[in-house]
Amino acid sequence: MRVRSWCNWTIILSSLSILTAMLLLTGCMNLGMKGESMQSALAAGHVGNALAIVEKEDSQQKDVLASMNKGMLRRMKGDYQGSNRIFEVAKRQIEELYGVSVSEQASALIVNDTTRSYMGDRYEQVLLHAYMAMNYIQLDDLDGARVEMMQANVKMQEWGEEPEDDPFVRYLSGIIYEALGERDQALVSYRLAKDAYKSSKKKHGLKIPVVLKKDLLRILSEEGLEDELSILKKEFNIKHFKAKPMAKGFGELIVVVNSGLAPIRHKQSIVANTSGEVVDTVKISIPKYTPPKERYSARLTTDSITSTDLQLVEDIDALARGALADDMPLIMTRAIARAVLKHKTQERVEEKRGAMMGFLATAINVATEQADTRSWTTLPQNIQLARVRLPEGLNKVKIEIYNAAGALVDIIEKNVQVKSGKSVFLTEHWVVPNMTLKVVADKK
């Protein structure tokens, strides 16, 4: 009896240890709260604080998501070299994870989806190259940016029968090729961007930006491709378009504004049917996005031109929601299978070990049922772009931010050195309105 009693207590203590470990694991996996902490710091204008959160979380540089966030935050601080160093780590980690292990798949079925290594959704993997390219642009290394665009192209082609072209990445590729004087490659990229915007419109709701239409028509005109030019003029309903050559003593400014912050995934608990299993319904946890945040528009003004609206070229909020919607059937399948397995295990434990052990098994099941809320939360909500021609020399530039009601809520002021016949880039991150300016605007 004493031996049996001792064994029972050993089992109980072991189970308590497991439960404690699982509860600690649950605390470590509160991923949504970490994302919210970073976004709260960014909303308060404290990029350094947000960076400190993620640097502490992944001091050994072993996590793809942490590397993505660190890279973006370093970029926001203007450390473009440091940003690309950690983005390169993320790229290497993703490549290493492409062959997901059987053990990880098994643990995801038994424990939860957060036990699987995170390698980013497709749109995140491609945007990783885009932001590395923008870092190289800021470092005045267009060749480095070109390499990243080529790698992004390879990445998109790797998806084979289910291609998922990112239209903004295609467009950015064309802009970079054109800045390098590689007009044939630029034309190919502009065509691919047009096709990608058209094919993804139903899913993400983004039309072909007018700025891309004009770029495509301009380069077709300059290359003398009159047949295609005529067809696209009709398709774009820009029948009277005429390409204007760059005037002597002028260069081009390309402005990219990364506006707002990407949505954060949260946990949602629901009751689902098990389709013919012994258990009719089970409670599962799945990820979800909260409703979209307010959107802002941007307008560019300089001393030499009238104001020009920046155009929406990438809707990351929509990309994130679309990716989750695509993944949801498989997420639900795994969650239901996991819940059934855990329930059956709990019943067997209770039958063989008694009510106390059944209770412990139930507690462990509850503690380990976590929705996978991981996503690249330091990405912007959207990306806006404008191209303007400016006189060579120093130009004072203002990027005005407006809310949905049309009220001015913030102003970004920059000095830009323009060279004749060359392209210069300005890539900015903007998160939330300047509250002081907002109060003044409201009083008016």
Image (cartoon, rainbow, N blue to C red):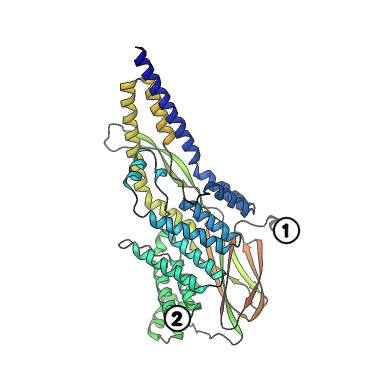
Q: Amino acid at mark 1?
A: Val
Rounded to the nearest angstrom, the CA distance separating label 1 from label 2 is 46 Å
Residue under label 2, please give it: 183
Q: Is residue 66 visible?
A: yes
Q: Amino acid at mark 2?
A: Arg
Q: Position of residue 101 (x, y in %)?
A: 33, 48
Question: Is 377 in front, or is 212?
Answer: 377
Q: Is residue 380 visible?
A: no
What residue is rendered at 30% in x and 62% in y? 161
What residue is rendered at 40% in x and 51% in y? 325
Residue under label 1, please give it: 440
What residue is rendered at 40% in x and 85% in y? 225
Question: Is 162 in front, or is 288?
Answer: 162
- Compared with 215, 295 (above or below) is above
Crowding at dot 1, Cα within 10 Å, few <14 / some 14-19 / many 20+, comes out as: few
Label 1: element kind:
helix
Crowding at dot 2, Cα within 10 Å, few <14 / some 14-19 / many 20+, comes out as: some
Label 2: element kind:
helix
Judged by depth in the image, the label closer to the viewer, 1 or 2, is 2
- Compared with 442, 167 (above or below) is below
* Badge 1 vs badge 2, beta-carbon distance below 8 Å: no
- Compared with 39, 267 (above or below) is above
Question: Is 289 in front, or is 345?
Answer: 345
Q: Give the quadrant of the C terminus.
A: bottom right
Numbered disc total: 2
Judged from this view, the residue extending furthest toward the left is 276
Instruction: Say left or right for 247 vs 278.
Output: right
